[in-house]
Image: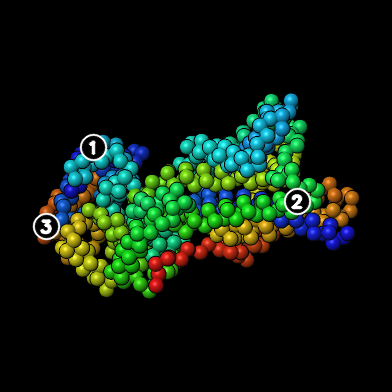
Amino acid sequence: MIRLESICVDFGGLRAIDHASFEVEAGRITGLIGPNGAGKTTAFNVIAGAVRPSAGRVLFDGKDITGLKPYQRAQRGLARTFQIPHEFTRLTVLENLMAAASAPEGENVFNVVFRRGSFDAEERAIYDRARETVRFLELEHVIDVPAGNLSGGQKKLVELGRALMRDPKIILLDEIGAGINRTLLGKLADKIKLLNTEQGLTFCLIEHDLDYVSRLCDHVLVMAQGQLLTEGTVDQVRNDERVIEAYFGGGKYEAQA
Amino acid sequence: MELTGLFFYLVSILIAGGIYALLCLALNIQWGMGGLFNAGIAGFFAVGAYTSAILTTEMSTKHLGGFGMPVVVGLIGAGVLAGLMGWAVARICVRLKSDYLAMASIGIAEIMRLVIVNESWATNGSLGLAGIPRPFGEFVSGRSADLVFLAYVWAVVLIVYLVAMRLYDSPWGRSLRAIRDNEVSADAAGKNIEKFRVQTFVIGCAFMGVAGGLSAHYFRFLSPSATDPLLVTFLTWVMLMAGGSGNNRGAIVGGLGIWTLWSVTEIFVNRLPPEWVTRSSYIRMLLVGLLLQFVLQKFRAGIIPEKSPPIRFRE
C-alpha cells in the first residue's frame, strides 16, 4: 500500500534517513520499531508529506505521491496521528471530529453564506459519524469539552477519532500508546484489531512497548540509524542478533556511536 | 437645548461606534476565526474610504472623480477594491506565520497610505477630498441627516453581522477555527490551509473597506489623517481583544463600548489645565492602554468569550 524507495532525509548535516526502502502492505497491522533516533517518526513524516525527502520516492497504492502536500495525501485516504497530541485546542471533542471530516459542500464559502440548505445532508452525515466515533472511543462524557482541556490520553483518542472520520485506507499511529493507561490501552488494541479485521483498515504504528507490538502487529519493520535493519514477525525479529544489538548497544553500533 | 445637544452627541458616538463595530467584525473574521494577524487595518480602511469617495463625488479639477454614483455603489466598490487588495496581499503573505504576517501587513498598509498621500492626481494628496455625499443626502439635511446615517450604518453592521454569523456557524468556519488552533493537524486532516486563509483575508479586508467607505461618507471630507493607524488599526485591536476575540457579538460590544469610553475621555481631558491639553491625546492613549490591561487581566478571553456554535441536529 505504501512503498518507500531509497528515501534520504537530511536535517542540516544530520542524515536522519539514509537510503531506506520498505513497504507497508495493505490489510495488515504493521509495526515500525527501533531505538530512539532510528528515524521512525521521520519516516512517518515522509509518508504523510510533512517532511520532504532529499532523495527517493514515496508510492501510495502504486502512485507516486512524493510531490504531494500533506492535505492532498489526506484527501487520497492517508490519515495519521501525532506523537505529541495536536488537538484543535478551542474546539470541542465533537467539533474536533467533525472538523476532520471531508465536507466539500459545507466548506464552500459561497454555500455557507448564500445557500445554507446545500450542505444539510452532508453535515447531518458528518454529525452522525462523529457521534458514532465518539461512542466507539468511549469519549461521550467529554463530548462538549474543549479538546485543549482533555488529558493526554484522551487527546490521543481524539486524534485517532479524527483519523477515522475521513474513511482512510491507512492510518499511521505514532506512539498512540504513550500516556494512555493500561486498561484503556488494552481496549484501544482491541479497537484497532477490530477496525483491521472487520473493515480491512490498514495500520502502521510506531511503538516502543514490544509486548503491545506483539499483541497487535502481524508484521514488524525494524529501523536503526536511518535504515531498515530487518523485518518479519515479532518473534523472528525479537531473536535477531542485530536487533538486540541495536537496542542494547555493543558491537557495530556501539563503535559508531 | 442641553438635551438635544446630548442626544446628538449620543448619535455621533453610535455612528462612529457602528463603523468601529464593522472593523471589529472584519478583524474577528481574520483573527478571531482565522488566526491571521492583520496589523494593516488602516491600509484597507483607507483604500475603501478613497474608493467610495472617488466613486460618489461630483466632478472636480483637483482629483480623480466625477462619477457621481450612489453611495451604495461606492460602498460596494470600496469592498471590492479593498478585497482585491487583500487578495493580492494574501497571495504573497498568507503563508507567513502570524507574527511575520503582522509585520508584512503593517508595511503594506503604510505603502498604501503613502501611495494615497502622494498620488495627488487621484486623491488630492494631503489636501483631501471634499463634498463627499451622504446616503439619501438629497432628501434630508441638517441634523436629521445624522439620524438617517445612523440607521444606514447600523443596517450595514447588521448585514455584516449576519454574514459573519453564517461564516462562524458552518463547516467552513469550523475548519477555519481548526486551522487556527493547529495548522499541522488541519493539514493532516485534508484541509487546504492556504485556500481557507486567502478567503478569510479577502472577506475581512472587504468589510474593512466598507467601514472605510462609511467613514468617508460620514465626515463628508476625507484626508490621509483620517486613516491614522493609531486610530484605526490600534484601536480596533484593543476593541476586539476587550470585546472577545472569536465572538461576533463580542466584536460589536467591544467596538461600541471602547469607542464610547474613548469619546467620553475626551470630555475629561479637555478640562485639564492648559499646560496638559497639548498632551491630551497621549493621555487618552495611555488610558485606553490601561483599560486593555485591566480587561485582559480580568477577562482573559474578552467580555463575551468565544463559544462553539450549537449543532443543529442535536436532539
Q: Is there a contact, CB below 8 Å, between mark 1 and mark 2?
A: no
Name the residue: 39% across, 72% down: B315
Q: Position of residue B285 (x, y in %)?
A: 73, 51
Between B119 and B94, the one nearer to me in the picture: B119
Q: Which residue is mark 3?
A: A233
Q: Which residue is mark 1?
A: A56
Picture colour scheme = rainbow
**Mark nearer the N terminus (1 vs 3):** 1
Name the residue: 89% across, 50% down: B274
Q: Where, quadrant-wise, is the N terminus of chain B in this rendering?
A: bottom right
Q: Position of residue A3 (x, y in %)?
A: 19, 44
* Residue A189 can be seen in this image: no
* Residue B315 can be seen in this image: yes
Q: Which residue is mark 2?
A: B146
Q: CA distance from mark 1 to mark 3?
A: 26 Å
Name the residue: 28% across, 59% down: A164
Residue A166 as seen in the image, left or right of residue B145: left
User: In the rendered structure, the residue with mark 1 lies on which chain?
Assistant: A
